[in-house]
Image (cartoon, grey):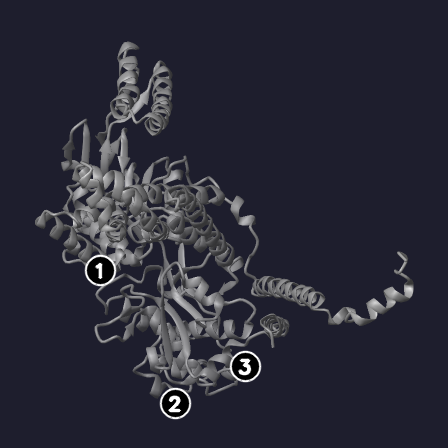
Amino acid sequence: MAVVTSDRGRRQAAATQASFLYRPEVRQVIYQAILVILLLALFYMLIHNTAANLRKQNIASGFAFVDRTAGFDVSQSLIAFNSSMTYGRAFLVGLLNTLLVAGLGIVAATILGFVIGIARLSSNWLIARLATIYVEVIRNVPLLLQLFFWYFAVLKALPPPRQSLSVIGGGFLNVRGLYLAAPIPEPGFEVVAFTLLSGIAAAIAVYVWARRRQTLTGQQFPVLWTSLALIVGIPLVVHLLSGSPLAFEYPELKGFNFQGGMVLQPEFLALLLGLSIYTASFIAEIVRAGIQGVSKGQKEAALAIGLTQGQSLRLVVIPQAMRIIIPPLTSQFLNLTKNSSLAVAIGYPDLVSVWSGTVLNQTGQAVEVILVTMCVFLAISLITSAFMNWFNRRMALVER
Amino acid sequence: MTYLNRLVLATAVGVIAMSGGASAQTKTLDTVKQRGNLSCGVNVGLAGFSQPDDKGNWTGLDVDYCKAIAAAVFGDPSKVKYVPTTAKERFTALQSGEIDVLIRNTTWTIARDSSLGLIFAGVNYYDGQGFMVKKSIGVKSAKELNGATVCVQTGTTTELNLADYFKANNMTYKPVVFEKLDETVQAYLAGRCDVYTTDQSGLYAIRVQQPKPDDHLVLPEIISKEPLGPSVRQGDDQWLTVVKWVHNALINAEEAGVTQANVAEMLNSTNPEIRRLLGKDGELGKGIGLGNDFVVNIVKAVGNYGETFERNVGSGSRLKIDRGLNKLWNKGGIQYAPPLR
């Protein structure tokens, strides 16, 4: 009969199964819940203990200090800042300075690193030896010493403002920095700017279209010349036709320093140079490892089908080498970002110098300030890693 | 045990350990006596205040104060561990308990007395901020410094006073900020900035160390009050009293004419003030947790305030700074201490 699921049957079935607490899956859930509760309790106690100790010692805590007046100035910042603005604004100034030097440093180090790495594998004996010497020397000297070298040794060699060296384009080079003419857009400049931006967008579109056309039909397209015409040629023509709406402000020596124009301060230049050159030596080795990791048969096959040395490197070897290069390259980018915190030793107002240095000392709230600094560097590193991982996945070869 | 069980057990132990973490109020004097030496925070290297010589021995005005406290507590001025601190880490070192007292040419301000959890025990040097320029730029007064580039150290009252002074006088300037004293001075000497600014005592100290001191000019303007003094952690009144009265003892010793040379024979004096000072009458030392002869030990170790000053920053040193405001109150200065009675 179909009605076998009597109560007695169900009770018998339940009796043979283990009781509630002895079932493995139930135990797992209970243990994990206990662990989570204990971890939360641990964190809560850590935070509570710290806050209680700070309060007992009468040390101020909390983030209210962010709205207080800073009272100090910084030597350079991308946004306007003076001593009557808040500590929060000073934080932004430091953060932007760090991002600026880290961003430019990463670009410069990558370019230089690739060049040196490829140079080390060159068949020209002299070039290969010079690249080897560069890598071995730069890798083994501590970064702080290299920064001191660039800042103090090079700085001492530059003349004082009254005897500046002239640079083409109306600029001056002296111990206070590299002064250049600043471009000032006049009313008609928006048209030129618009042409420039749309030229860049059009060049990217042409590049993508040309790649797709080549994949489908094999026909090549002169992308480089077209891009040059779009980005440089057409805006230049528009600029000249609309009466050159771009004035230049030249730096002039007034009193102690040059006024007007734009200035690249020696702290910034020394930090950028030091960081780029140091990190480039590591990137060079990574690039060399990547290229040597591609099997020799690939290069021979490329040469056999008639590609030149340069083409085989660019079109066959390096795309495969990128798989090996990108993960360690990410580490070097993160290293460069964190090494930029040495800026305080040579007077560049980066995040660590302004926020973890001056603001920490003036407010005395070490716990909050250091916590924020750590979180900021963590965020920058995670964003860089995420981007590089996406890039890595795109570069991954699809294996059969 | 399974891995998960071990993890749970470890976390539980951690939580229990943390919950017993409420600490009793620490008595620094007891800690120092138990440890057997004084942990004293000093400058990494500022001529006249705290500097290691070529054999590694620390000398200076602040160092002598450390020795005086050790002499008062232990009777032996050598029982000091000197902890060199930069401007950036000096307060955290004191807050965290790494040092017992901070005697590091630190300015007494309300911000430092409050939100940092510290409290100042007195002023061992009345100073003010000044400017130093190279004679070759031809400036004779700070009012002519509009548009100048100024080298300054990070995290100091110097940075703030500089901004205030230039704003108040409607002048502009460009700051170049470094962490360490050496880097700041090197940049000034290399010509990166026109002006170097710090407390005037520091300016004289730096100037005298240059190969050609006469190439540099200390401008006459003093733009701020910088009362430099020792500081301790808040919430420990007994230790604050000890440090305060070591300083007062030095001043009172100079007032009474007790010097390092004559303290031995002064012990036989019949002058009631001197008898009280040197502990022959009364239980004054015991009242603050030290021996009754703590002043004798101090003066035997470092002399009185005047001798300490002259030996480290005054006529007996390379700096040759005039005592100025640091003279005794009855000799034209403002060093004044409450009486020992």
Q: Establish if B250 lies above or below B146.
A: below
Disc 1 element: helix
Disc 2 element: loop
Judging depth in this view, the residue of B50 and A7 nearest the camera is A7
Q: Position of residue A305 (x, y in %)?
A: 20, 37
Judging depth in this view, the residue of B126 and A170 nearest the camera is A170
For this view, does A375 lie left or right of residue A286?
right
The local crowd at label 3, few if under 14, some if 14 to 19, many if 20 or more residues have their Cα within 10 Å, is few
- The residue indicated by pointer 1 is A140
Camera-side mark, 1 or 2? 1
Identified by mark 2, the residue type is: Asn
Identified by mark 1, the residue type is: Asn
For this view, does A133 lie left or right of residue B153?
left
Q: Establish if A345 lies above or below A224.
A: below
Marks 2 and 3, how far apart at CA:
23 Å
* Res B191 seen here: no
Q: Chain of mark 3?
A: B
Identified by mark 3, the residue type is: Gly
For this view, does A72 lie left or right of residue A250?
right
Q: Which mark identifies residue A75?
A: none
Q: Chain of mark 2?
A: B
- The residue indicated by pointer 3 is B287
Q: Establish if B338 lies above or below B228.
A: below
Tag 1 and tag 3, C-beta contact below 8 Å: no
For this view, does B270 lie left or right of residue B323?
right
Judging depth in this view, the residue of A8 and A381 nearest the camera is A8
- The residue indicated by pointer 2 is B268
Q: Are marks 1 and 2 on the same chain?
A: no
Disc 3 element: helix
* Res A122 seen here: yes
Residue at 20 percent of width and 42 percent of height: A175
